[in-house]
Image: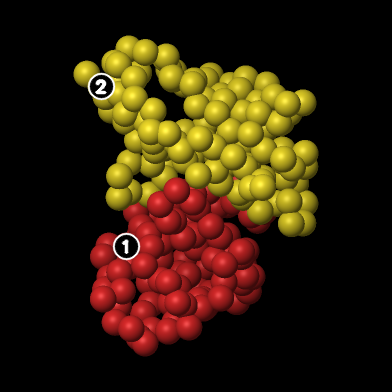
C-alpha cells in the first residue's frame, strides 16, 4: 500500500539533545513537508522540499534542520536550539510542486522533552 | 490577525444533526480550499478539495466557498458518532508566497449517540 510512514510514533528527548524524526513516502511525490501541531494553533510549516537536494524554510524553521537526499525520504532533526520542542510533528507529501495542494499526511510523531 | 480564523469549539451535537463548520480568511489571493479530518493522535486526512468559489458535495459532506465574503463552510448531514474528530480548514493561493498552505486552528466536533 502506498503511503507516508513516520517513525517513531513517540519520542522522548533530554534537554540539550538533538533528535531525528523519520519520514518516508512511497507515493512517488515530489514535494514533502514538515508541520508542527500544538493545541489550539493548527498546523505550522517548519520546512518543505519540492525536489531532491533542495528545501526551503517555512514559518518556524529556527531550531530545526532537514535533508532531502532521496525522493522518498525527508528526515527532520530537532536540535538543542529549539527551545520548546514538545509537540506533535506531522510529515506530508504532495504530487503538486506547489506548496501543499492535496497534501497527504503521515500518522505523526509525538515528541516530549523530559 | 491570523490569515485563517476557525472557531476551535468544541462543538457537541446529537447523532443525526446537521453540522456546520466554518472558516474565514483575509487573503483574497487564496484559490484552493480544503477540509481535513483528524482523529485523536492521528494525521489529518483530506475530506474535500475545492477550487475557487462554489459548492462541492461528496456523500454526507458539502463544502461551500464564498470568495466575496472570504468564508468557507463544511456541512455534515446525518452526523454519526464516527464523525467525532477535529476538522481543519486549509487554503492556498496560486503563486509565490501565497502558494503556501495555511491551516485554521481546527474545530473539535463531538457527535453524541
How far apart marks 1 and 2 lie (CA) works out to 28 Å
Kindly identify the residue that appears in the image at 42 percent across and 72 percent down.
Answer: A84
Crowding at label 1, few (<14), some or many (≥20) Cα neighbours within 10 Å?
many
Where does residue B14 sit, x and y in percent of width and height? 30, 16
Q: Quadrant of residue A87?
A: bottom left
Residue in the image at 52% along x and 31% along y:
B48
Q: Residue at x 49, y 51 (%)?
A: A41
Q: Nearer the viewer, residue A42 or A56?
A: A42
Instruction: Using a 10 Å C-alpha cutoff, classify the residue at mark 2 as few (fewer than 14 neighbours), some (14 to 19) or many (20 or more).
Output: some
Which chain contains the residue that carries disc 2?
Answer: B
Tell me if A109 is positioned left or right of A66 in this view.
left
Q: Colour of chain A?
A: red
Pointer 2 residue: B112
Q: Please report the residue visible at 61 percent of the width from the left and 23 percent of the height from the top.
A: B64
Split into 4 quadrants, where in the image is the C terminus of chain B? top left
Label 1 SS: strand
Circles 1 and 2, Cβ within 8 Å, touching? The answer is no
Lateral position of residue B60 relative to residue A50, left or right? left
- Shown in yellow, the chain is B
Residue A7 visible within the image: no
Residue B72, horizontal then vertical, whole percent: 61, 28
Q: Which residue is mark 1?
A: A110
Regarding residue B56, the answer to whether it shows in the image is yes
Amino acid at each position: 500500500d502506498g503511503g507516508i510512514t513516520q517513525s517513531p510514533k513517540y519520542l522522548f528527548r533530554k534537554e540539550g539533545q538533538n533528535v531525528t524524526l523519520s519520514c518516508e513516502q512511497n507515493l512517488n511525490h515530489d514535494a514533502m513537508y514538515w508541520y508542527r501541531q500544538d493545541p489550539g494553533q493548527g498546523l505550522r510549516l517548519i520546512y518543505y522540499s519540492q525536489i531532491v537536494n533542495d528545501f526551503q524554510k517555512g514559518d518556524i524553521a529556527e531550531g530545526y534542520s532537514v535533508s532531502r537526499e532521496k525522493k522518498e525520504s525527508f528526515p527532520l532533526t530537532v536540535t538543542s536550539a529549539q527551545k520548546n520542542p514538545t509537540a506533535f510533528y506531522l510529515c506530508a507529501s504532495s504530487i503538486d510542486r506547489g506548496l501543499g495542494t492535496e497534501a497527504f499526511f503521515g500518522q505523526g510523531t509525538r515528541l516530549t522533552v523530559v | 490577525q491570523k490569515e485563517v480564523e476557525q472557531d476551535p469549539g468544541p462543538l457537541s451535537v446529537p447523532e443525526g444533526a446537521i453540522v456546520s463548520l466554518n472558516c474565514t480568511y483575509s487573503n483574497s489571493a487564496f484559490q484552493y480550499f480544503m477540509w481535513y479530518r483528524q482523529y485523536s493522535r492521528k494525521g489529518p486526512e483530506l475530506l474535500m478539495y475545492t477550487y475557487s468559489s462554489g459548492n462541492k458535495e461528496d456523500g454526507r459532506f458539502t463544502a461551500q466557498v464564498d470568495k466575496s465574503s472570504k468564508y468557507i463552510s463544511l456541512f455534515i448531514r446525518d452526523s454519526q458518532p464516527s464523525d467525532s474528530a477535529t476538522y481543519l480548514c486549509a487554503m492556498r493561493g496560486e503563486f509565490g508566497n501565497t502558494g503556501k498552505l495555511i491551516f485554521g486552528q481546527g474545530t473539535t466536533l463531538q457527535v453524541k449517540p
